[in-house]
Image (tube, rainbow, N blue to C red):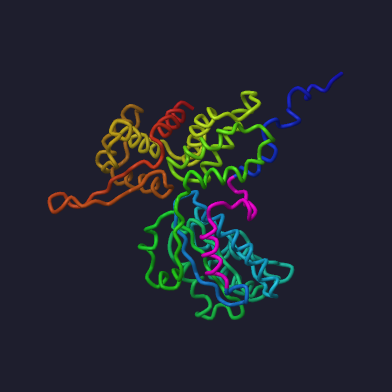
Amino acid sequence: MPNASDDLFTREDPIFANKELLEINHLPGEGRIVGRDDEISDLATAVNPAIFGQSPSNVLIYGKTGTGKSLCAKYVSQRLVETAEEEGVKATFAYVDCAQDTTETQAVQTIADSVNDTAITGIKVPDKGLSTSTYYKRLWRILDSLYDVVLIILDEIDKLSDDDILMQLSRAGEAGKIAGCKLGVIGISNKIQYKDRMDERVKSSLCEREFVFPPYDANQLRDIMDARSDAFRDGVLDPSTIPRAAALAAREHGDARKAIDILRYAGEIAQSMGASTVRENFVTQARQRAETDRFRELIRGSTPHSRYVLQALAILSLSNQQQDGFRTSRVYEVYENICRQQGSDSLSLRRVRDLLKEHAFLDIIEQSKHSGGSAEGSYTKHQLLEDPDVVKDVLTENADT
């Protein structure tokens, strides 16, 4: 009697050969990093002294999401560790996602834990339960016990609740916190104006070198996707699929992450439809699905009123497509209407302002300050960074569940 599971599962994937190449967190090899030769070279020059056990420059990298900032920082750091070892220098790097570790305590705990080797140091770094100063003391001891040089990558540095950890890290050497180890910081931000709100003392020590990563153009995006095309089985990709995905992504955002997402989703659509090839017409469907899934993930767990505020902004955006942003008072009016329709009491204007700030923090919306002159004073405008159709669809779907 045949096993019933034989018909239930596919034993061989007809579309993908190595799907991991299309995952966002996959760190490609040197040959797969496309269109960033100059940026990699500049970054390597800034940290180059580290391979001789000297202090690397502190670096701040700016650029929109999906421009290869984190990828290049990790790649250069990994290469530095390997090259330093050949020179007899003990080096390592620590990576902190500041969108996840937003407080000083969380960030220093993550750094200390990732660079520690308890078997050698005898130092424990528990997840929680220690004061911030104790975490720092353990980190300094670990660094001096194990390494000559350490690079610390602070990704989405603008999500940190304050500058305190930047002050500590960038001045650890001159403050005598570490004696034998040299420390370098690579800060990464999606916000070009981030430096403007930095403490002046931090700015002077952290911003020794600054680099801006521009968005990818269509040719670079096509090369990036070509470099990962062996994620698919031979002959599965239609010749026009990657050029179409690259053109679409370049026109909208120049974001390599989204471009790779679109390609992966197009493969999954082909898979679900039982198609033998990943065709060009799957790309448009894949783009919509990628945008929808990303936004759904962003608002997962948000409160009803948080969603009503976004719904108000989506309604305004769809009915006034030529307008670049809407005042808080206008958003509040539409939000109150939505609350009435939902049979819910509306929150205060001040609380709605706070919700809009939270959405700006997550890069769902963009806020800009304006001056109306002496008659009006200053005011804030809010603009969706997400496709308003996607926002409306996901929020409507949310309300139905």
Q: Nearer the viewer, residue 347 or 210?
A: 210
Residue 82 sits inside the magenta stretch: no
Q: Is residue 229 visible?
A: yes
x and y, in percent, of residue 391 in the image:
41, 34
x and y, in percent, of residue 71 in the image:
56, 54
Query: Where 348 falls versus 236 (above or below)?
Result: below
Residue at coordinates 40% horizontally, 31% vertically from top-left? 389
Residue 33 sits inside the magenta stretch: yes
Q: Nearer the viewer, residue 226 or 199?
A: 226
Left or right relative to 164: residue 27: right
Residue at coordinates 68% horizontally, 74% vertically from top-left? 87
Left or right relative to 382: residue 285: right
Number of on-image labels = 0
Left or right relative to 117: residue 194: left
Residue at coordinates 63% horizontally, 55% vertically from top-left? 30
Residue at coordinates 47% horizontally, 60% vertically from top-left? 61
Q: Nearer the viewer, residue 127 or 43?
A: 43
Query: Where 63 falls versus 146 (above or below)?
Result: above
x and y, in percent, of residue 272 in the image:
62, 26
Judged from this view, the residue extending furthest toward the right is 1
x and y, in percent, of residue 193 in the image:
37, 58
Task: Please identify the quadrant where the N terminus is shown.
Answer: top right
Q: Which residues are magenta?
A: 24-48
Magenta stretch prevailing secondary structure? helix
Residue 234: quadrant of the picture: top right
Query: Where 143 falls versus 236 (above or below)?
Result: below
Judged from this view, the residue extending furthest toward the top is 1
Q: Is residue 129 visible?
A: no
